[in-house]
Image: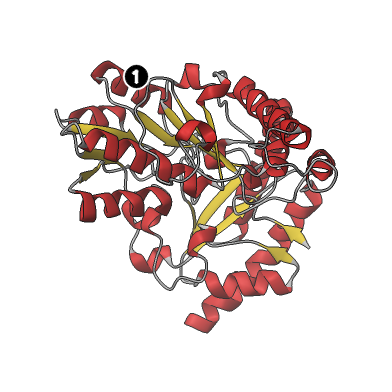
Amino acid sequence: MIYLDHSATTAVDPRVVAAMQPYWTEQYGNPSSIYGLGRRAAAALEDARSRIARVLNCQPAEVIFTSCGTESDNLALRGIGLAQAACGRRRIITTPVEHHAVLHTAAELAEHHGCQVTHVAVDRHGLVDPAAVSEAIRPDTALISVIYANNEVGAVAPIAEIAEIARQQGIPFHTDAVQAGAYLSLDVQRLGVDLLALSAHKFYGPKGVGVLYVRRGTRLFPAQTGGSQERNRRAGTENVAYAVGMAVALELAQADRATEAVRLAALRDRLIRGVRANIPEATLTGHPTRRLPGHVSLIIHGAEAQGILIALDLAGVAASSGSACASGSPTPSHVLTAMGFSPQEAMGALRLTLGRENTEADVEYVIEKLPAIVKRMRGVIG
């Protein structure tokens, strides 16, 4: 199988598995316990926190372990939204191309907690203009949330510019950086963000663990209550093995980031050229240059993505039509429609995302097989 869905998930690196193994067996203690087994688990947890903090260029106390990127986004929006609402600030500024973890949480805050949500429009490439974000700010603005790298089209937003606008206005700024973990800088000081969400399984770590960075001094209500874990910000016994695995995976990904980005960008560009040269009416979506290095997103006009994906699977290629969280949904992508594509065009979305194991031979195979598949699917629709 040729796996081209790395934006959905990645295989766990064997080095990460090795690092986690002891915490399922010999070192299985609860990190809240005071005896030796618990203290060793707590030490491993804090070591993982410190290692992640070094990558993010922040203090360990600013790192909150969660179960995934979705929970991290939920904690950020609810935590800030409810804290700010108590002070009379109830407006959330975001974009229409966010992950549903942000969009649905903002909608829930509006429906049940009296918040107002402003969606700042994006351009044809899926990017928001920082000036437009600035214009949307009102005295009651509680939070600004803009995705770092879009999961469907790979566009990389001008996060540092938007964060600077938020900082000047004294407004907390959150970014969903789930797709950025393996390929972009996560230095929160240079980015200027106040909250940043990550998920380990997007950079060769395990599914079921994430992180929310929260800048010191940021008022955050817990979305989940119970024990005093994570400094009273996220109750529940911590998953020590997965926290250790996430730390190792993030270190490895960031250590290889520069060289791997160059390699993947070359494969990406070859795949884009090959597809567009051999398939008429194949439109690249997302920004042509401000995009993730391994991310190819297209609209195949006159064909439906589901048929293409099934045919690719039969040919030994795993791909997707966009967000894994919306897989199988009969509705068109909210990201593409927000970018100005018609619902019919959006139903032809194809996402091919490259990763560590992909080679030039993989790319050439897809370039060879895809045109015939598209021609056949167009014939079915015609």
* Residue at 64% in and 55% down: 5
Question: Which corner quadrant of the image does residue 320 belong to?
Answer: bottom right
According to the picture, the residue beneath numbered tag 1 turns out to be: 164
The extreme front residue here reads 35
Q: Quadrant of residue 312?
A: bottom right
Q: Report crowding for label 1: few under 14, some 14 to 19, many 20 or more residues within 10 A (C-alpha).
A: some
Rendering coords of residue 79 (x, y %): 36, 39
Give the image location of residue 167, x and y in percent. 31, 19
**59 above or below 290?**
above
- Left or right, 121 with reference to 327: left
Residue 76 visible somewhere in the drawing? yes
- The picture places residue 305, in percent across and down from the top left corner, at 52, 69
The residue shown at (77%, 54%) is 362
Q: Is residue 291 visible?
A: no
Q: In the structure shown, which secondary structural element does the residue marked by tag 1 occupy?
A: helix
On the image, the x and y values in percent for residue 218 come to 37, 25
Q: Residue at x 14, y 28 (%)?
A: 139
Quarter of the image for residue 135 reads: top left
The residue type indicated by label 1 comes to: Glu
Q: How many marks?
A: 1
The image quadrant where one finds the N terminus is bottom right
For image coordinates 27% across by 43% down, the residue present is 121
Q: Classify 277 as above or below 342.
A: above
Q: Is residue 297 left or right of residue 373?
A: left
